[in-house]
Image (cartoon, coloured by chain):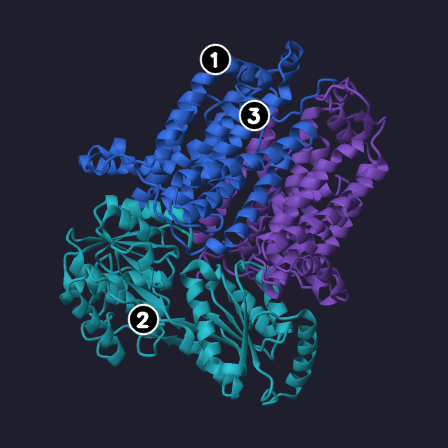
Chain colours: A blue, B cyan, C purple
Amino acid sequence: MSADFVISALVTIVGVSTPILLAATGELVVEKAGVLNLGVEGMMLIGAVTAFAVTLSTFNPWLGVACAAAAGLGSSLLFGLLVLWLGSNQVATGLALAIFGIGLSSLVGTSYVGMIIPRFTSIFPDALARDPFWRVVFGYSPLVYFALATIFGVGWLLKRTRPGLVLRAVGENDLSAHSIGYPVLPIRLAAVAFGGAMSGIAGSYFSMVITPLWAEQMTAGRGWIALALVVFGGWRAARLLSGAYFFGILMTLELYAKASGFSLLPSQFWAAMPYLAAVAVLAVISSREGRGGEAPACLGRPFLPNG
Amino acid sequence: MNHRITRRRLMQGAGASLALSALGGRAFADEPLKVGYIYLGPVGDFGWTWAHDKGRKEMVAALGGKVVADYVENVKEDASALPVLRDLAQQGHRLIFTTSYGYMEQSVQLATEFPNVIVEHCTGYKRAKNLGTYNSRFHEGRAVLGTIAGMMSKSGTIGYLGSYKVPEVVLGVNAFTLAAQAKNPNIKVKLVMIDSWFDPAKESAAAETLANLGCDVITTHTDSPAPLQLCEQKGIFGFGQGADMSRFAPHAHLTAIEDIWGPYYTARAKAVLDGSWKPDDTWWGFKDGTVKISPYNPRMPKEVQAEADKIQAGWKSGSYDVFAGPIVDQAGKQRVAKGEKMKDADLAVIDWYVKGVQS
Amino acid sequence: MRIRFEKRPEPSRTMQLLTPIASVLLTMLLGIAIFDLLDFDGPRAVKEIFLTPILASYKWQDVAAKAAPLILIALGLSLANQAKVWNIGAEGQYITGALAGAAVAFATSGASGSWVVVLMLLAGVAGGAAWAAIPALLKVRFKVNEVLSTLMLVYVALQLLSYLITGPWKDPNGHNFPQTAPFTAAQQLPRLLPGTPIPPGLAIAIVLTLVFWGVAKKSIYGFEVRAIGAAPDAARYGGFDLARTTWSTLLISGGMAGLAGILEAASQLGQINLGFPSGYGFTAIIVSFLGRLHPVGVFVAGIVLAVTYVGGQVAQTVVHVPNATGGIFQALMLFLILASDILVRYRIRFARGGGADPEAVR
């Protein structure tokens, strides 16, 4: 196992983990505020096609990412409006958003099939980005660093700042938060919007970094893995971060095992691991403290100030 | 435009053609033959489906007003393909091509339900009175790619990205490996199956894994240009699949196997038009023009180009067969003796890899 | 001037009936607009998607074939949803049901007689129910949120399917392609029930719709389920067992999904391949909401959604819209029905001046 082998593997793992980290970070904030948005996969695809289309016409990848964030945010507002102000069922609305996003992105993307854009690679100088050793630090697309900065930022925000405390309060006990005077619904909407933007950016990673092209449903279910990741991380930022790389290692391990001729376990076992792991973690943390563990107490439930 | 049909005209046409077909014979001398296609992916995929659609267009161009062709894309390989096929049949399409393995049962059922419709199933093996199968000898192209890879690989390790362990893919892997070994007896071929025909992110990650493990030439049997894009990024070489994909990777793209379906579709439509169609199991290759190698990348050295040309010429003239013995499988057992060649029937069901493939 | 939502003394029946219909109509209008925006023939496309499958008799069988699994799954989901048990893993239970039925088929290969198919169907129910038992156990024992557990298990079921058909259950005569061996004639259902123009799947759906309706209207169990959903604490004081309801609704909805799965496998292609998971488990959620969780409503909603599926395919051939549009329409219908839900429970009042709490929407 040479140094180069290890470095190459690390680079691949980071690449695989980043999109789910981005989406899961967004969904973490949403769920911490007490809302369950299952539409991540749809929002990611909307982000992916938007990023591609904008980058293709403007040759500006930054604009592409920004527009992807805006598109994801916009679609999440549709969800937020229905769920927060019209009180519609969060599970069903989230699923509708997912289905809608898949369909809309396919429809919009039909004219972009077969086109290419330049890959959104590292902004560091080639000497560092392509250096056999230093590429493990400097060789990534800006989205990778953004993802890391964001999860650290979110973790710090949630744990150590007043807005984070308010957000958590809204998610743990919305009635108390309301009686203290916090605007529960606007806070939740802001969280939902953040989640939408992050999902959009996660989607842009697919069409701009992994494979600079557009293909229907190109996120191939990573949105659902992101949901599993939030659960797996026990709704904690630090665990979510390590979970993201853990999932990335699992996914990469499967490929390495295949390429090296080892198949200890069927590949489907590895592919199912993230979901099985999430269920296992759920079982462990939900039963702790008898009350539901670390899931935000109001997760998925509508805000009913008048009972 | 050919494929815009009005519903009313269809229903009238369907009624009329069904009545006429009851009479049988060459009653279609005046009315153009309606040909239908169902595709697995979108026509813009620049790969498998795009090539079929190109063939459809060539057929229409070759036969002028005698044929009218329509297609339905993104047809899933499950029960929902049946209503689509029935629609096409009821709309008066008398020749229908189903362009993917997963349409096999549906093609069989369609042929049973509509005995006057001729169905041709690509890469399948079930036939009936009005159901034929057709395939292309992609492995002939793989031999060309293998020759190039064998000569151009400096690390002695080349990569093959596959989808499923089905005969078509296994054939490709073996042809690629045998041809590469002919140029470099010590060459190693690393194989990864990603259990999907199309998943760009996974294809890219798998290609990256192969590159990390030392492959400096990678070929793929999956449908997106993602692996090529990865090769371009890593500065290694790759090949296009199904179509010339050089625009996706101008430095990495050495050449590609192109699927040329035009001649076959034209021939079959003609056969239906003049009443000579018979169910067949067609397996054309270089000789008949269904396999083509796209222009070489100028970065390819002249000797390599010359060797690749030689292989192509050999297939065309019949003097070359990559599956000529002795061939040994991964376990060391001899499968083909010296002086023998593998028969088509064995090639069609092959499920073992040759020695040198690391899978 | 402010818009105020005033809670109705009891849910409006007119609205309950009107809103699904209005949602469908509004979706059609929105659809025309979306298609026109993207340069397709809007009115034509919408006509093909919504009207042609109803008007063209040769399409009815396709509609029936698509509606049956949707109705079956949605019947089970509606029951669970009434108890506020959210089973969104029906797609996974659909798959395991089909696999269980296939297991029986392979175990009895060569046998003939109608008991084979019946056994397969029962196995399908059992397989789906077993898969739903996992989240049920997790919820009752470990307080795990069933939304997450049922959803995660869908993807595990998909991998299980992939493993079985590329490995132990791969068709030995299938040239190594990822598919099971085909079912024998004894293991398949006829296209139509002998002597009738009705496909067996739809017949079963009709019967079960009536059964569920009867249970909902007349039985204590139906009442119990609704009571627990509406007011869990009061229901508990009344002696109803929440854990039992969780178990029963999850098992029933899982069983229904499993039944739909094996029916589909046994009647359509007689074989299971990678294309088998068609997303019915997720679409059925839309069906159950569109049908307002009422068995008869679900039946009608299932037909409506089947119409959009079939119509979507027709539109593909005729107007050349991409088949992704089917999903868009279904999602739009769901959005609209969810949004209009508020009209059922609240009356809109226009009041002059301020004062009303903008957050008190419920």
Q: CA distance from mark 2 to mark 1?
A: 64 Å
Indicate the position of residue B158 as horizontal and vertical percent values.
22, 54
- Mark 1: which amino acid? Thr
- Residue located 63% across and 51% down the image: C34
Kindly tell me whether residue C262 is visible in this rendering.
Answer: no
Please rate how many residues cluster around mark 1, counting C-alpha atoms within 10 Å: few if below 14, some from 14 to 19, many from 20.
Answer: few
Instruction: Give the number of the disc on residue B292.
Output: 2
Indicate the position of residue C48 as horizontal and vertical percent values.
68, 61
Give the side of residue A219 with respect to residue C352, left or right: left
- The quarter of the rendered structure image containing the N terminus of chain A is top left
- Mark 2: which amino acid? Lys
Chain for mark 1? A
Please rate how many residues cluster around mark 3, counting C-alpha atoms within 10 Å: few if below 14, some from 14 to 19, many from 20.
Answer: some
Indicate the position of residue C76 as horizontal and vertical percent values.
69, 41
Query: For this rendering, which residue is in front, B324 or A248?
Result: A248
Q: Closer to us: mark 2 or mark 1?
A: 1
Q: Are circles 2 and 1 on residues that touch, CB within 8 Å?
A: no
What residue did someone put label 1 on? A161
Instruction: Give the number of the disc on residue A190.
Output: 3
- Residue located 46% across and 47% down the image: A53
Q: CA distance from mark 2 to mark 3?
A: 56 Å
Give the side of residue C341 with respect to residue B274, left or right: right
- Mark 3: which amino acid? Ala
Q: Are circles 3 and 1 on residues that touch, CB within 8 Å?
A: no
Q: CA distance from mark 3 to mark 1?
A: 16 Å
Chain for mark 2? B
Give the side of residue C334 with respect to residue A270, left or right: right
- The quarter of the rendered structure image containing the C terminus of chain A is top right
Q: Secondary structure at mark 2?
A: strand
Q: Give residue C39's quadrant in the image.
A: bottom right
> On the same chain: label 2 and label 3?
no
